Image (tube, rainbow, N blue to C red):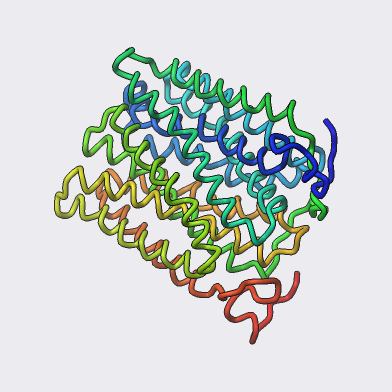
Amino acid sequence: MQILPLAEARSLPFWRRPVTLLFLMAIAMPLSFATWSALLNNWVIAAAEFDGSDIGWLHTVREIPGFLAVGVIAVIIFMREQVLALVSLALLGAATAITAYFPTMGGILTVTMLSSIGFHYYETVNQSLQLQWLPKAEAPRVLGLLVAAASAATLVAYVAIVMTWRAFDLSYAFVYMVSGGLTLVIVAYCWLAFPQFEAPNPQVKKFILRRRYWLYYALQFMSGARRQIFVVFAGFMMVEKFGFEVHEVTALFLVNLVANMIFAPLMGRAVGHFGERNALVFEYVGLTVVFLAYGGLYWFGWGVVLAAVLYVVDHIFFALALALKTYFQKIADPGDIAPTAAVAFTINHIAAVFLPALLGYLWLVSPEAVFTLAAGMAVTSLCLALLIPRHPEPGNETIFARVMPAPAE
């Protein structure tokens, strides 16, 4: 493959430029992962009679590669980040395609582990490439558009599931095979159509943990812990408590996708206009209210309509997580982006390794307690977000930086 400096990429036709590659990869990933997620709760209950504890263990296994994402630093010594991104996407697509052929607890966990390695290594490298390839002034807007593009592509898949699942009596095996296959087709195109882009700042290819990034690390840790509760238990609640079937769960995902297509670009612009601190404060206040309302579904017996509305609103708030990326982009040394993306992804998944399994047992006793705990995590994230300065930059990473500057190491 041709290696091309990033500065020369402007001379390429639009369909071969770095931003186009980012958009294609953003489309390829959710075709597999989002389809896997949409069918997961119904699939594991139908195939292996999972309960709350089982689903917790499944997600614990799924998050182990995220915890080990720091291994990306070792891989990129021998493999370019762009190549690793495509290889990881290919693994995700292949594992998704064969998911339904292993309908046992052990088989489901094994295939989940393989797809998770692809997903988490792709996400780690993709975040690094986005922050290296996108100018700081344009990053919030383009990141919002990338979220919208991924939602639009997945929308097509979900509409197909909703319209054909019952009409053609589709099987889990067929849907998983098609979604994983489409990801593999896009990966093949990206491999053949694009040169390898060389960013102007060489990346540090060793483990680094800088004290001046401590707030970013803390926000990543809380984000990972809080998000696990939504990913694992919010969707499971819709199936277990309210009896949603496959086409109904997928329809709910469709609403989320349309909302992301509309609001993600607006949120990207809002981050650029109001700043990362204000965007994250707004997100965490909203998530606190949403998680408390989830608990109210059990405390007060609120109905399925409110549950569905909360699920969509919850998903919209998570789109503001792009502010965390742009906050780091503004405070980071250019050469730190790749290794810190790997370290941050590992930090993000520390809680993910034990929380799903642990809270799975709590879920059996008190589902409302699980969501109350999530609300407490959102409040903690809110307190941390208030420490972000209005204009973050190297040397001004937190509101304390001017009076107590952190060392560069």
Q: Is residue 12 above or below residue 157?
A: below
Nearest the eye: 359 or 6? 6
Left/right placement of residue 345 relative to residue 200 reads left
User: Which residue does the image show at 35% across and 18% down from the upper left?
Assistant: 164
Quadrant in which the N terminus is drawn: top right
Left/right placement of residue 57 relative to residue 143 reads left
Residue 33 location, x and y as percent? 50, 33
Residue 293 location, x and y as percent? 25, 56
The tally of labels here is: 0
User: Which residue does the image show at 44% across and 29% down from the upper left?
Assistant: 156
Quadrant in which the C terminus is drawn: bottom right
Nearest the eye: 341 or 19? 19
Q: Is residue 363 above or below residue 333?
A: above
Residue 314 location, x and y as percent? 36, 51
Residue sitting farthest toward the left = 301
Residue sitting farthest toward the bottom = 403
Nearest the eye: 225 or 192? 192
Q: Quadrant of residue 161?
A: top left
User: Which residue does the image show at 70% across and 71% down from the upper left?
Assistant: 394
